[in-house]
Amino acid sequence: MSMQVMRGWATRHASLMGLIGLLGVTQEAQAGDYDGSPQVAEFVGEMTRDYGFAGEQLMGVFREAQKKQAILDAISRPAERVKQWKEYRPMFLTDARVARGVDFWRQHEAVLARAEQEYGVPAQVIVSIIGIETFYGRNTGSYRVIDALSTLGFDYPPRAEFFRKELREFLLLAREEQVDPLTLKGSYAGAMGLPQFMPSSFRAYAVDFDGDGHINIWSNPDDAIGSVASYFKRHGWVAGEPVVIRADVTGDRADEGLTQGIEPVKTVGELRALGWSSQNAPRDDMPVTAFRLEGENGPEYWMGLKNFYAITRYNRSVMYAMAVHQLSDMLVQARGNK
């Protein structure tokens, strides 16, 4: 949704009840899936008491919200077999994604350079994130965020608490940004815009990078670029530092060094004692994420550094972080060749 449309909506409705009235809907709203729901009534009561929302206007939003079975089907679908790196990598590191990424980089070169200067996050990493998340804005999601978060917050008990928190954050950001909460779209899980921020991440890390007084990550690449850079900076990105180091392993104890999960717990020195080595290894006392990937040519051993861990804070997956890193390298190479 364009910022002009956002502002137009706010102007037409601001007279209802100030900014709180921005969460109103038409007076003739029809009863929806959540009209009369005790869960919704309790939630609205909390929002009214704790955050000053007008209860009737907020109930009007939920009278328009719809329960989507497709969302419940999607989140309940059994997880696919965990792909090996040799299968995962080709899904994201494609010629088309690289070519479109180079175009995106050139189109927004000045903004990316400013984001890199202000936050220390390389332009190619920002472009890579947006490329992997939404193919540079092509696939940002088709569900209304209010439907996604209401469906999961009120009709998906396994994670209802999490999604109700995100629903709360979404309503707060809609009020703060003066946008109609019934119009914003995202993924089936409520992730939004070019960088696919959840509402809580939006409120914590998104920035008004073009200085127009609003944050719009849906159709304003400037704000999306600045917001990704802000996210990484806040999650520990260190300017000028490497992301990963390829390791060689020897002996029969190498796999004892592999990290269980994501958190960097073993140090370079501890890994060395287990048979890990690298020509470019950092100092012995540095904790790293040690992992093995099954590549096309066999096992690959890697040590993820602070910036690698920062990428995993965006998505807690070693393969995701490697895809972001390697796509960023491919973008640099492709850009230099054109």
Image (tube, rainbow, N blue to C red):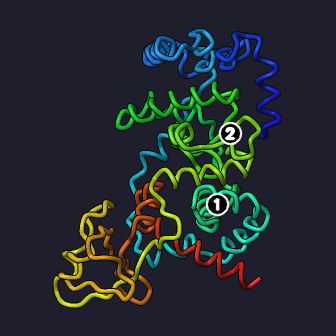
Counting from the top left corner in percent of width and height, residue 212 is at 77, 38
- Camera-nearest residue between 170 and 83: 170
User: Which mark is on residue 215?
Assistant: 2
- Camera-nearest residue between 195 and 88: 195
Residue drawn at x 73%, y 10% is 16
Residue drawn at x 51%, y 17% is 51
**What residue type is disc 2 on?**
Ile
- Mark toward the viewer: 1 or 2: 1
Q: Quadrant of the N terminus?
A: top right
Counting from the top left corner in percent of width and height, residue 157 is at 36, 32
Residue 110 lies in quadrant = bottom right
Vertical order, 204 against 125 (above or below): above
Counting from the top left corner in percent of width and height, residue 303 is at 35, 75
Q: Secondary structure at mark 1?
A: helix
**What residue type is disc 1 on?**
Gln
Q: Return the residue at label 1.
A: 117
- Camera-nearest residue between 17 and 109: 109
Residue 105 lies in quadrant = bottom right
Residue 133 lies in quadrant = bottom right
Residue drawn at x 27%, y 68% is 259
Using the rendered image of the protein, determine whether residue 37 is visible from the camera's viewpoint. Answer: no
